[in-house]
Image: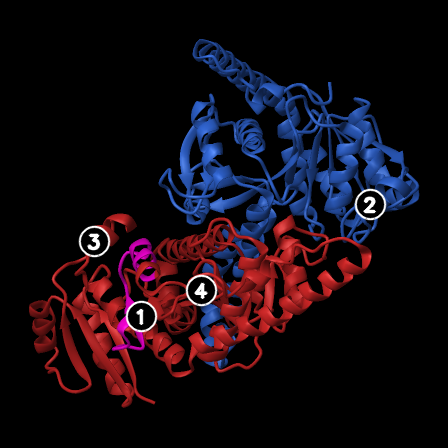
Chain colours: A blue, B red
């Protein structure tokens, strides 16, 4: 199946110097992939030339006259940059000209624009950001990483559905395990939202493992870890900070004197192998889930190897129909909650009380 | 000033085999320290004998006939173990026979018992657990680490006061900086509780730095980082899991073949220096703050070097009067909020509305 990805060629700290070499590598590796480079056509053409590449049926340029800067406010970008490379790339997804878009631009602006242009899927209250962490067993997908500081139990259930379908598409894993991030594994632990989420997850058709704790992210206890955007963002950034600190400590110890420097040289191959294993570039590409279109956010500082991984994620999501899978699974969960609500209503009638239904029965109502 | 510390000699995974050697080292290092070993006197005497030590004016035994196990429920321990080494050690703090107590026992049981026996300080709604993380600049103190899954802004302000006073006592740092853990540094970021907390902190007499993010914990941006117990616990456990994973990856790379093993041997001194720097034993000793007595929790699996650090924390808190400092600072903040409420009331009278005061004006009412 042919896939077309729209790339915000101007986004990120390095713009076309990173996005275009990555796009060329992606095309080389995948013969059923087409790419639309969106941005200032002069700049794109110059970079293509520098890479001795030309446009053709599989590689097109779509001119967009504006840029969203990294420090622009989401509302400002939404209001004032209607012909930005970011916005136009998303428009191509909306119009069906592209299956997905990838941008290394300003996260807030990208989310606001994607949400405005694409709208959320039926049954989704708010989109979430899913990212990948390395684990002792492979990779752990976590959501939300910061789009929603406060979440209801119903939203966390939606995140679980989205994360689960993402992993099945991108990692080709059927029925991935889902863990609920908590401060203890026992059912009585955590706050009210988490306890209610656990109930919803137990009643769902997902492969719910149960509560997990912070260390389970890196143990690889489950394929997906669900949490609100506040907790997810703190876990992500604390991990980044810790890796950076440990890297600095290790470097300092090896640079202490000429003898330790010599030791560093002696074990360089091992240190390189270790560094490669922890390389954040391998985990680049956060998925914006819950929208009526596929949007993948690359780290702003990504190099072309790193950006290539983000493109790869967008391709896998497109090829394996993540949007359909999410919608179908939401429908299943919706049916279930409808049944539960009806049963509850019947029981209530018998006991003389009335049912207000569950919040889940409103799934599918929004944006329709 | 002479300090007496009551030690729950039976607590933790290794009981007297760890607590007593640590107690003996602590006495040796500090001539104005007295220790009361609480627990089964036979077991304590046997361990003292094994260490060629005897009781005396600076080292006493206080018999306690029961033990709280590591998997006992907090309520079970509270109800059924009235003569446990943990409970009796806390009783000694309550009666004034000890300035502080240290236990490596069951965290939930220790918190429940400490709260029941000692009660909270005036102006404190709920006690919190403060722990130490290594940072690029030294040490970062974080609270709460899991005692309170949900917190109000007023509670987070109380945590900030407690953490600030803890650092001034234990690190001998006047006016330590306080950061509020958030998902961005801008004022508009975060949920409602965090935004309100930032307002209270800006109006307080603490050295409030502003919002910090997860990576700032390890950068050492501020001396104290304040967050609710859910977020703090996830950050703590995620960090533990990440360090464990990185350690395992590094070991695996060095054990790959005979050549890499040789490289490992060659740079062993550097790896040891690195490991020492990250050694969690150096950061052992979480302070239970907000109680009318000093309680320090050691990691259950602590060895004697590690447990010694927990004793050291208890001694520093006692010697530098952490309880008085917390009370005084709360009083200052209370006065401020009272002034603010009065001013607000006066303004309201002028405009014809009535004031409901602020929640902070209720500080000092509980437990009095």
Tell me: residue A290, above or below residue B23. above
What is the secondary structure assignment of the residue under circle 4?
strand
Q: Residue B308 in the image: state x and y as whole percent.
A: 30, 75
Instruction: State which chain disc 3 sits on.
Output: B
Structural distance between the alpha carbons of marks 4 and 1: 17 Å
What is the secondary structure assignment of the residue under circle 1?
helix
Q: Which mark is residue A10?
A: 2
Q: Depth check: give the residue in front, A327 or A22.
A: A327
Q: In this view, does B337 lie to the left or right of A78?
A: left
**Among the 4 quarters of the image, the one containing residue A358:** top right
Structural distance between the alpha carbons of marks 3 and 2: 60 Å
Residue occupying image coordinates x 85% and y 34%: A88
Counting residues from the start of the chain, the first of labels 4 and 3 encountered is 3
Crowd around label 4: few <14 · some 14–19 · many ≥20 (10 Å) = many
Instruction: State which chain disc 4 sits on.
Output: B
Q: Residue B17 carries which label?
A: none
Structural distance between the alpha carbons of marks 4 and 3: 23 Å
Q: In this view, does B275 lie to the left or right of B202?
A: left
Counting residues from the start of the chain, the first of labels 4 and 1 encountered is 4
**Among the 4 quarters of the image, the one containing residue A107:** top right
**Among the 4 quarters of the image, the one containing residue A298:** top right
Instruction: State which chain disc 2 sits on.
Output: A
Q: Does the magenta stretch include residue B259?
A: no
Q: Name the residue under label 4.
A: B130
* Magenta-tinted stretch: B94-114
Q: Name the residue under label 1.
A: B306
Tell me: residue B291, above or below residue B195. below
Residues tagged 1 and 2 counted as in contact (Cβ below 8 A): no
Q: Residue A168 in the image: state x and y as whole percent.
A: 53, 27
Q: Mark 3 points at which residue?
A: B69
Crowd around label 1: few <14 · some 14–19 · many ≥20 (10 Å) = many
């Amino acid at each position: 199946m042919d896939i077309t990805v729209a790339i915000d060629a101007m986004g990120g700290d390095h713009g076309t110097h990173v996005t275009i070499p990555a796009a060329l590598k992606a095309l080389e590796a995948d013969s059923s992939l087409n790419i639309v480079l969106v941005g200032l056509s002069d700049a794109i053409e110059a970079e293509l030339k520098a890479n001795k590449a030309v446009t053709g049926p599989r590689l097109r340029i779509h001119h967009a006259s504006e840029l969203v800067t990294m420090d622009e406010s989401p509302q400002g970008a939404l209001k004032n940059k209607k012909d930005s490379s970011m916005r136009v790339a998303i428009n191509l997804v909306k119009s069906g000209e592209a299956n997905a878009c990838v941008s290394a631009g300003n996260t807030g602006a990208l989310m606001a624009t994607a949400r405005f242009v694409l709208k959320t899927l039926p049954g989704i209250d708010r989109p979430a950001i899913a990212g990948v962490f390395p684990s002792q067993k492979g990779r752990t997908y976590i959501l939300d990483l910061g789009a929603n500081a406060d979440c209801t139990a119903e939203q966390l259930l939606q995140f679980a559905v989205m994360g689960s379908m993402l992993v099945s598409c991108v990692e080709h894993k059927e029925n991935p395990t889902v863990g609920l991030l908590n401060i203890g594994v026992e059912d009585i632990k955590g706050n009210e939202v988490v306890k209610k989420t656990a109930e919803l997850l137990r009643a769902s058709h997902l492969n719910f493992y149960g509560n997990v704790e912070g260390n389970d992210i890196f143990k690889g206890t489950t394929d997906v870890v669900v949490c609100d955007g506040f907790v997810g963002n703190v876990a992500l950034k604390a991990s980044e900070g810790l890796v950076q600190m440990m890297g600095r400590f290790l470097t300092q110890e090896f640079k202490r004197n000429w003898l330790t420097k010599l030791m560093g040289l002696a074990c360089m191959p091992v240190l390189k192998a270790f560094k490669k294993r922890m390389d954040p570039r391998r985990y680049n590409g956060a998925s914006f889930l819950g929208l009526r279109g596929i949007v993948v956010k690359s780290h702003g500082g990504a190099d072309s190897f790193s950006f290539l991984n983000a493109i790869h994620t967008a391709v896998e999501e497109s090829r394996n129909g993540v949007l359909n899978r999410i919608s179908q699974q939401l429908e299943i969960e919706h049916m279930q909650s409808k049944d539960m609500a009806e049963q509850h209503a019947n029981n209530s009638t018998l006991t003389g009380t009335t049912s207000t239904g569950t919040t889940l029965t409103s799934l599918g109502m929004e944006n329709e």
